[in-house]
Amino acid sequence: MEREVGNREQWSSKTEFLLTVCGNVVGLGNVWRFPYLCYKNGGGAFLVPYLLYVVLCGLPLFLLETSIGQYTQQGIVTSWRSLCPLAEGVGRAELLILIYDSIIYLVILAWTLFYLVFSFSSQLPWASCDNSWNTDQCVDFTSPNQTANWTTIINTTSAAVEFWELRVLAISGGIDEVGSVRWELMLCLLACWAVCYFCIWKGIRYSGKVVYFTATFPYLMLLVLLVRGLTLPGAWEGVQYYLYPDPIRLADPQVWMEAGTQVFFSYCVGRGSQTVLGSFNKYNNNCYKDSFWLCLLNGCTSFVAGFAVFSVLGFMAHNQGVSVAMVAESGPGLAFIAFPQAAAMMPLPQLWTVCFFVMLLLLGIDTQFVIMEGVITSFTDLFPVTLRRPRYREAFVLFFCLCCFLLQLSLITEGGIFVFQLIDYYGCSGACVLFVAVFESLAVGWIFGADQMENAIKDMTSQKPCILFRLCWRYLTPLVSLGSFILHMVDYKPLKFNHWYVYPDWAYELGWTMALSSILLVPLWGIGRICLGTGSLKQRLAVLCHPDDKLPLTQKGKGESKDGHELESIMI
């Protein structure tokens, strides 16, 4: 049976693990989200709440998830089932969030590939108003006359905005007007799925080789864009806007909430992907040291990317004779409107747009690899007898890709952007990730035991973690995450598209259904396990709070900890 089912894979080398994790955490958010949030929320002063969240939530949860995977050698769901059966709902909620991620993330890469193809045109289509899709309100900012007088023109749009909204998206009037599938985007989406499938269909021994290119080449592209950006006229004005500190903004709770959201998003915690990547490590890998260096790399990349982004935005503002505040964008607005428009004003615009979109494409593909691997591995560990057989994994990966592709067809219609933002806003971020992080840290800190987690890391790495991690897992991380969750709910604002389109009531209900599907899964799964157990309530809790006897420390007789004794005495 062991030969038929097959053994669980491991990384061929530690370098593959480090590059894969690097490709996961260093993604699109580092380029198009962090710089804008830093500028918007006080410049250099924004680094104070950001670094505080990194220390109290980002790094502790990053180490926690990586070490859980390495310690249990299991995927998202089965690792929590082994560690703390009562908290298995945490793993299932993280798996559901990853599935939502896999539905929307590749659509971004399809847009990126679409732009990359057009970047090889002799005349960039977003640089002029002479195209069939342009309206009478279109303004060509590459023209000196238009650039000089654009502030006097009312009700105008740039060529870059019209290319994005009218050519790429062919955007409809709302989510009720679905329209037809954009066949060009469908071909781009199909190409992206084909690449992802053939990179991960055989497992990490194949995808681990791909990241040698996909995780390193974006840094070369970022360096090229950084050097070019800093040599442009107006670049330093943009950098000044990016970093100029405004300490008064620290009194705004919104700044702190956005700092926390960025840390959870950028460090990919609360999703379980780090658990899966850590599960392929050898048991004695030093995940403690790895977590420090990878988190440091992630933060530094975000900070440096801000110089590349805002130097280009400063150049764009300089050419148009406006402030940087009027051209700064975040998310798709930066990637598909602001930067292409700025690149069109430079000499050799095709070169810089190709570099930019190749960088985005590779950054996104790395993250998509991990999202898919997280889902596939978790299902494989749930059904090992079936899915570890020869050719069964390949068939399951193909089935998963086809299901996601069919669901994504609704996201590349004329009303698809409205569906995309609805899933992104409610299903993949915000409240659901913060809620999962609260219970994730509580389960380890108080049920499995922070001391026992320290012993597990020491047993794997021969290095006991700093006492700060024990304090974070038991007190600081759940309190900060819970505070952020409450603040997010109190300050909740219904999603609007482009700050003006209000979704119909049924769309908001659908959004909250996606959010609650992962939030409620955590407590309801635990309650269900208690109700279906046998014996008295104390006996059921004792069984559900006890880790699997097959875990290494349990086998060695080292598993008891102060936290475990405290919990046992409470239940008795």
Image (tube, rainbow, N blue to C red):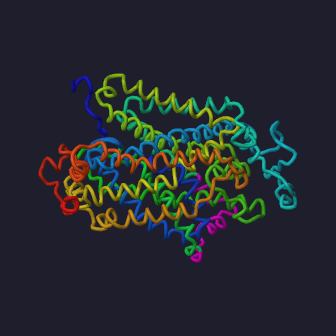
Q: Tell me the residue at 46%/66% (across/down).
A: 483
Q: Main secondary structure of the magenta part?
A: helix
Residue 463 in view (yes/no): no
* Above or below, 27 relative to 116: below
Q: Magenta segment: does it hold 539?
A: no
* Above or below, 58 relative to 502: below
Which quarter of the figure has residue 165?
A: top right
Residue 263 in view (yes/no): yes
Q: Is residue 252 left or right of residue 198?
A: right
Q: Check the picture and name the quadrant holding the N terminus.
A: top left
Q: Nearer the viewer, residue 222 or 135?
A: 135
| Residue numbers of the magenta segment | 225-248
Residue 360, percent from left and from top: 56, 45
* Above or below, 155 relative to 479: above
Q: Is residue 408 left or right of residue 211?
A: right
Q: What count of labels does the image hold?
A: 0
Residue 312, percent from left and from top: 65, 57
